[in-house]
Image (spheres, rainbow, N blue to C red):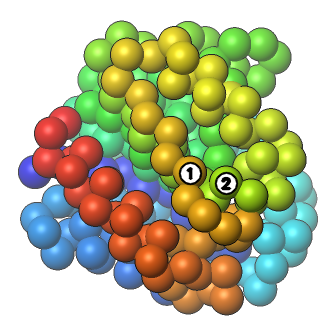
Amino acid sequence: MAEVLLFHHAQGLTPGVRAFADELRGVGHIVHTPDLFDGRTFPSIEEGLAYIGDVGFDDMRERGARVADDLPPALVYAGFSFGVLPAQKLAQTRPGARGALLFHSCLPISGEWAFGPWPDGVPVQIHAMENDPIFVGEGDIDAAREIVAKVEDAKLFLYPGDQHYFADSSLPSYDAGATALLTSRVLEFLDRV
């Protein structure tokens, strides 16, 4: 079984993020779900991003990265949207990573926003909806395609639809069918890393 460090999205550690973690735990995986917002949740992405902006994006990302200091190095790093920032940073820069699961977001591995090249031997899955205006419109899809083109064990899964947080069962954007497929792919990934 895998040990996973799962970071929440900009609306906080919602019941839907907790439920996703519980589903992974239900089949025997260890899943850590740090609350980077100290119990706060937000009714919209915009309000959550405003809070992150007040704290500072870099500070919030580093808060997430520091969570790993008290955990073993052999982790799978996972993140929902904003949570991809600390997850991807740790997967790329912390030795011992077993894999990365990037949901609804992806950072480039070259250029100004990159943490550097993707490390050898670290598999990655990227999941998003094919018409998500944030994932597609803000260039995350290009970053994901770059990773898939350059990393041996990298997969990009695009699901029909246009929702951003489609895997959070506590939000109106939830898509049960897409989430079931995402979850089955994630479980297969965790069983092999």
| Disc nearer the start of the sequence (1/2) | 2
Q: Position of residue 62 (x, y in %)?
A: 63, 39
Say which element carries label 2: loop
Say if 177 sits above or below 153 in the image.
below
Q: Given contact means CB atoms under 8 Å apart, are the residues at marks 1 and 2 in contact?
A: yes
Indicate the quadrant where residue 180 lies.
Answer: bottom left
For the point 42% across and 56% down, the residue is: 6
Image x and y of residue 137, in percent: 86, 47
Count every numbered label the image shows and give the total.
2
Give the Cα distance between marks 1 and 2: 5 Å
Instruction: Read off the residue under disc 2.
Output: 130
Question: Can residue 98 be seen here?
Answer: yes
Residue 9's place in the image compared with 89, above or below, is: below
Q: Nearer the viewer, residue 154 or 57?
A: 154
Residue at left 14%, top 47%?
Answer: 191
Q: Quadrant of residue 55?
A: bottom right
Residue 104 placement (x, y as % from top left): 62, 54
Q: Amino acid at mark 1?
A: Leu
Q: Is residue 177 left or right of residue 111?
A: left
Q: Tell me: residue 171, above or below residue 94.
A: below
Q: Element under label 1?
A: strand
The quarter of the displayed image where residue 112 is located: top right
* Residue at point 30%, 16% (across, down): 121
Q: Is residue 188 found left or right of 103 in the rendered image? A: left
Question: Residue placed at 56% from the left, 51% from the top?
Answer: 158
Query: Which residue type carries mark 2?
Result: Glu
Q: Residues within 10 Å of mark 1 (few under 14, many from 20)?
A: some
| 186 to 193, vertically: above or below | below
Whether residue 83 is visible: no
Mark 2 neighbour density, 10 Å: few (under 14) some (14–19) many (20 or more): some
Circle number at residue 158 = 1
Residue 142 or 42: which is nearer the viewer? 142
